């Protein structure tokens, strides 16, 4: 009951809040769950609907994978080398503080309104956050555990597997969840401005048509998909942290 009851109650509270907001603003201004699901039921029968969902999901996963592939080794180097971290400090500060819309629009103006510009811009937006979080995780590694591994003459592979990775795992999985969420938001944002396909494009289209049901329907579907992916990452995080649980504790 505790494992599933509270999440279901939380989901129910979202539906209730949505319904109350509909009653407050009026169904013509903010359609309720039933009207939105009815509209969604009509859309899911169309191939174009799944095409827009699929291209957005592909863009989200590509940007997510590129940000992690570039950010993990960069963050590792930043954590190990104070000199490199000091040199890269201004670049990271610019990347973290520069308005994201500026990076996105600049990429569209320089590269063009194409796929390459969107993926490049969002990867650059995500990269500083990933690198900084990994750097701090590396700096927080317990040196005593590494000394113990050397004392027991563990190989480099075993040291990574049994000493370093368990310490980094919770941070890395938490970072992956944040990066995935930010990737989804920025991809949709970029599609509104510079693409002619995807969820963001359709949200912009329905906005111009003053069709709130379309905006909510696409938002609901992508939220469900990304929530499922986030749930998978959360499960991996719990599985990877079981070694931290005290004997007899909950898995």
Image (spheres, rainbow, N blue to C red):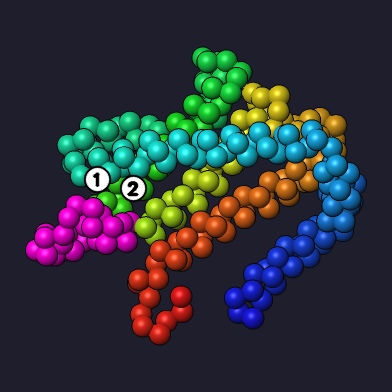
Label 2: element kind:
helix
Q: Is residue 89 left or right of residue 6?
A: left
Q: Position of residue 157 (x, y in %)?
A: 23, 53
Quarter of the image for the N terminus: give it: bottom right
Q: Residue lying farthest left?
A: 151
Q: Position of residue 217 (x, y in %)?
A: 79, 46
Q: Is residue 1 left or right of residue 239?
A: right
Q: Which residue corresponds to the image point at 38% horizontal and 32% vertical from the top-left?
A: 94
Q: Is residue 130 left or right of residue 191?
A: left
* Residue 154 vertical position relative to residue 84 in the rendered view, above or below: below
Residue where numbered disc 2 is placed: 134
Query: CA gap, disc 2 to disc 1?
Result: 7 Å
Residue where numbered disc 1 is placed: 79
* Residue 132 vertical position relative to residue 63 in the rendered view, above or below: below
* Residue 61 vertical position relative to residue 178 in the rendered view, above or below: above
In front: 118, or 150? 150
Q: Which residue corresponds to the image point at 20% horizontal and 44% vertical from the top-left?
A: 80
Task: Magenta stretch: give its range.
Answer: 140-168
Q: Main secondary structure of the magenta part?
A: helix
Location of residue 82 (image quadrant)? top left
- In contact (CB < 8 Å): disc 2 and disc 1: yes
74 in the magenta segment: no
Q: Which residue corresponds to the image point at 17% horizontal and 37% vertical from the top-left?
A: 83
* Residue 24 appears anywhere in the view: no
Q: Position of residue 244 (x, y in %)?
A: 35, 72
* Residue 237 vertical position relative to residue 30 in the rendered view, above or below: below
Q: Which residue corresponds to the image point at 70% horizontal and 72% vertical from the top-left?
A: 9
In front: 98, or 8? 8
């Amino acid at each position: 009951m505790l494992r599933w009851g509270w999440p279901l109650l939380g989901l129910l509270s979202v539906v209730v809040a949505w319904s109350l907001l509909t009653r407050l603003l009026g169904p013509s201004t903010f359609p309720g769950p039933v009207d939105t699901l009815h509209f969604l039921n009509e859309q899911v029968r169309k191939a174009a609907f799944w095409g827009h969902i699929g291209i957005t999901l592909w863009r989200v996963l590509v940007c997510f994978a590129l940000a992690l592939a570039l950010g993990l080794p960069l963050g590792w180097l930043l954590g190990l080398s104070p000199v490199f971290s000091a040199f890269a400090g201004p670049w990271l500060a610019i990347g973290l503080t520069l308005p994201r819309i500026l990076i996105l629009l600049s990429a569209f103006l320089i590269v063009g309104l194409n796929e390459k510009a969107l993926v490049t811009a969002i990867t650059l937006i995500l990269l500083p956050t990933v690198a900084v979080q990994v750097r701090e995780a590396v700096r927080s590694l317990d040196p005593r555990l590494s000394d113990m591994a050397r004392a027991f003459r563990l190989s480099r592979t075993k040291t990574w597997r049994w000493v370093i990775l368990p310490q980094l795992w919770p941070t890395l999985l938490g970072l992956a969840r944040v990066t995935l969420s930010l990737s989804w938001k920025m991809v949709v944002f970029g599609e509104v401005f510079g693409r002619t396909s995807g969820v963001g494009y359709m949200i912009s289209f329905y906005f111009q048509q003053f069709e709130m049901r379309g905006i909510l329907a696409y938002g609901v579907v992508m939220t469900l998909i990304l929530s499922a992916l986030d749930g998978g990452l959360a499960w991996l995080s719990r599985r990877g942290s079981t070694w931290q649980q005290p004997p007899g504790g909950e898995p």
